[in-house]
Amino acid sequence: MTPEKSVESVKYSDEWFLRLYLASGSVEEAIASYPENLPISAANFHRLVVRNGLVTSAGRHVSLPETLHFFRLKAMEQDTPLERLYREFPPSFKTSLSTLHRVYQRIEKGLVNRKAAALLISAESDRTQILIGRELTGNSRYGKHAGDFSIPMGFSRQEESSVESVARVLQQEVFAGEAAKGNLHTGSELFKKIVPENIEPIAYFDIVDVEVSVYCLSIPIIHPAFESYKLAEHQFLNFGDMEALSLRTGVGEIVNIYQSYLDNPYTVEFPVRYRSEVNLALSQVFEL
């Protein structure tokens, strides 16, 4: 979906530029990818983004699907050195061997290097109904498939508040249309209806060298239309319905965390830290 396909935005209006930004991921990518010369400077584009309260991208990151795919294979082939396993990958695999060594060392030491936020968004009338959508992009070779289902989630900056992390994901993966209209900044009425003022994670989920902060939100019965350049076909599903779906790696484990949270709201002290199945499998490799 591009800004031209939005019947609500006039070309080169503020909303049009903000949609282009959300579709591209950054001001620089928006300018570089658009086939025409845009009538706005990079500096003014940045100011427009900030003025409308969009939380900027968390920056470039090593591909999580690639590293997950690599270390899942490593966990299965415990006796295979990283170098030999790496040589078996095709040129399309972009993550460098030195990067994989650094990630491997961090996993071994139980350290995290990157941060992300995942939103468990429930229907206001039923907390067992979780918002999911279909991935619009992916790399089927390395574990992230376009068409897989996912909860809204994305990378965070190291030193930012929970509110900023949550706002970025809401703006990019849930209500992009409202974000482009300037209606989803952290001081807006819509944002305040959805996000508690002092929101904190219910859990931390370590997957490879990424610490995912898991947040719970509820959406009012009457809310704007779901819209995103990353997820499509937003819908609420209960736990049982999700079991038959093809889920993005780690999503099923995060949903299980939420189910445990609902089942034990007073008997377990939250936030709880969990390690992904991939990390647990690799920990067995380290013990050999």
Image (cartoon, rainbow, N blue to C red):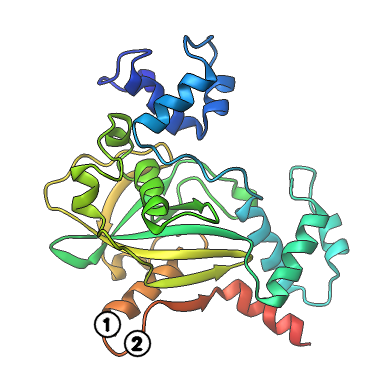
Question: Can residue 20 be seen?
Answer: no
| Quadrant that contains the C terminus | bottom right
Q: What residue does disc 1 label?
A: 265
Q: Quadrant of residue 189?
A: top left
The residue shown at (52%, 32%) is 26
Q: Position of residue 217 (x, y in %)?
A: 27, 60
Q: Position of residue 196 (x, y in %)?
A: 25, 60
Q: Is residue 99 left or right of residue 271?
A: right
Q: What residue does disc 2 label?
A: 268
Q: CA distance from mark 2 to mark 1?
A: 6 Å
Q: Quadrant of residue 76?
A: bottom right
Task: Give me the disc on residue 161.
Answer: none
* In the foreground, 55 or 251: 55
The type of residue carrying mark 1 is Pro
The type of residue carrying mark 2 is Val
The residue shown at (34%, 47%) is 170
Q: Relative to residue 98, is residue 76 depicted above or below? A: below
Q: Are marks 2 and 1 in contact (CB under 8 Å)?
A: yes
The residue shown at (37%, 18%) is 4
Q: Relative to residue 107, is residue 44 depicted above or below? A: above
* In the foreground, 196 or 154: 196
Q: Secondary structure at mark 1?
A: loop
